[in-house]
């Protein structure tokens, strides 16, 4: 009986998910659908001419989880209430102390740009067309802590630490954005909106949570960012957005029916020249093996749903990369910013090492042209260029874990990494 009830509940979740993906797509796509109809007409139509002119290279910056709460929040100009309800830590200042004991003092209060460190110079050098991060913290003063072992929050007055890196979009379908309840989510959404940062993956209802962030790229097209979260990353079922309930865009499962719903949502919005990104919070924190169901789901999103880039995150360390049908699948981008410095356990995975992924896509075909990665190390709550030896370590990991997917990396003279794969002919 319990199994039947669970199956019926999952079917209901799936129907709601698909229904509101369609609703979100239709709401956003009134004009784009008309544009598609025009483009299907005469060769001399203005829309077709615009699409031909829009061809070019669109470069995305994506990375692993960005957690600017707890200890990081405490060193920023406006530290919030440090009270925690964790089993072994009752104040966020404790994480600052652990980090300083490991690597020396942090010059607090730091300025807003401090946490990005050497990453800012790389962003200025590459000049990506769109900057996308998974923001894995609530941005709130709410004291309504969810009943869970770890709760992240950053004071809203510290939001300039996100705008300091000129982030275009924060994906929010993850297992920490509701750490301080639905009031915390509402404040997070409003704070990001006020700061001019687009969001995807969470909203005041499922329609908002399922809607993509649309990033125009002048003369080239658009980047459409869809954000999804999976139960496998620890997102509670109660956090799922519904018609009249705020929450996250939580995947009911990895089934073909779920893929179909995503396809319909993307199809209502995507135009020629657009790059569709599926940013997915999935899987556990530690371990290199990619579950078969995740790989199949990622491939189906490409085959059936019109996804061009799969941006996976949740793992605290980098995982392998696949290029499937010319489209990149980043199974796990690792952490990018956090306050884990000095915390023991899982050292073999080198969670302190991070990658900046610069994904260059052909807007005409939607295929990957190149993927460059800049290695970083999190130290003093700041991103620093990784040493040569640490870069070689990442090089070996990506080659080892990419082998099963037919990919590898090459070490460049500037201590960056370039993905190798067999392009489609």
Image (cartoon, rainbow, N blue to C red):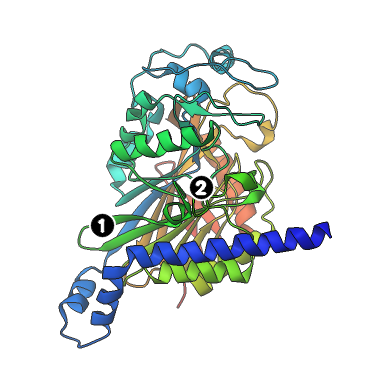
Whole-percent x and y of residue 174? 54, 44
Q: Report the side of 43 relative to 137 (left or right).
A: left
Task: Write down the residue under mark 1.
Answer: 217
**Within the image, what quadrant is residue 29 found in?**
bottom left
Residue highlighted by disc 2:
245
Secondary structure of residue under mark 1? strand
Where is residue 5 drawn, in percent x and y?
76, 59
Q: Residue at x 47, y 33 (%)?
A: 183
Spatial distance from mark 1 to mark 2, Cα to Cα?
33 Å
User: Compared to 328, does 139 lie above or below?
Assistant: above
Say which quadrant the C terminus sits in. Answer: bottom left
Residue 339, given in percent of the width and then of the height, sits at 54, 25
Residue 268: x %, y % from top left: 38, 70
Q: Nearer the viewer, residue 386 or 334?
A: 334
Give whichever of 357, 283 is nearer the camera. Answer: 283
State which quarter of the image contains the N terminus. Answer: bottom right
The answer to which quarter of the image holds residue 298 is bottom right
């Amino acid at each position: 009986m319990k199994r039947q009830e669970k199956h019926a509940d999952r079917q209901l979740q799936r129907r709601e998910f698909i229904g509101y993906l369609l609703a979100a797509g239709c709401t956003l796509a009134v004009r784009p659908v008309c544009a598609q109809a025009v483009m299907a007409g005469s060769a001399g139509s203005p829309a077709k001419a615009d699409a031909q002119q829009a061809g070019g290279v669109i470069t995305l910056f994506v990375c692993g989880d960005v957690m600017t709460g707890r200890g990081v929040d405490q060193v920023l100009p406006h530290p919030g209430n440090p009270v925690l309800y964790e089993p072994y830590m009752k104040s966020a200042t404790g994480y600052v102390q652990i980090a300083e004991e490991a690597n020396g003092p942090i010059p607090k209060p730091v300025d807003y740009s401090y946490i990005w460190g050497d990453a800012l110079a790389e962003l200025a050098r590459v000049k990506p067309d769109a900057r996308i991060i998974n923001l894995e913290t609530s941005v709130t003063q709410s004291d309504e802590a969810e009943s869970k072992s770890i709760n992240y929050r950053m004071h809203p007055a510290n939001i300039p630490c996100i705008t300091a890196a000129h982030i275009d979009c924060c994906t929010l379908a993850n297992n920490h954005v509701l750490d301080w309840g639905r009031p915390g989510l509402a404040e997070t959404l409003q704070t990001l909106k006020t700061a001019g940062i687009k969001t995807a993956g969470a909203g005041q209802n499922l329609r908002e949570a399922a809607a993509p962030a649309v990033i125009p790229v002048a003369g080239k097209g658009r980047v459409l960012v869809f954000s999804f979260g999976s139960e496998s990353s620890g997102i509670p079922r109660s956090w799922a957005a519904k018609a009249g309930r705020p929450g996250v865009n939580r995947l009911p499962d990895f089934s073909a029916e779920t893929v179909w719903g995503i396809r319909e949502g993307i199809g209502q919005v995507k135009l020629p020249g657009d790059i569709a990104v599926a940013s997915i919070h999935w899987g556990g924190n530690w371990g290199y093996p990619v579950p078969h169901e995740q790989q199949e789901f990622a491939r189906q999103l490409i085959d059936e749903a019109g996804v061009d880039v799969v941006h996976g995150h949740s793992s605290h360390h980098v995982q392998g990369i696949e290029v499937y049908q010319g489209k990149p699948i980043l199974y796990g981008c690792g952490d990018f910013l956090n306050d884990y410095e000095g915390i023991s356990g899982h050292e073999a995975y080198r969670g302190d090492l991070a990658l900046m992924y610069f994904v260059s896509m052909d807007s005409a075909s939607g295929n990957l042209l190149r993927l460059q990665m800049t290695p970083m190390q999190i130290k003093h709550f700041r991103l620093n260029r990784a040493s040569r030896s640490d870069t070689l370590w990442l090089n070996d990991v990506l080659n080892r874990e990419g082998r099963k997917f037919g990919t590898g990396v090459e070490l460049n003279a500037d201590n960056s990494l370039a993905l190798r794969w067999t392009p489609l002919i």
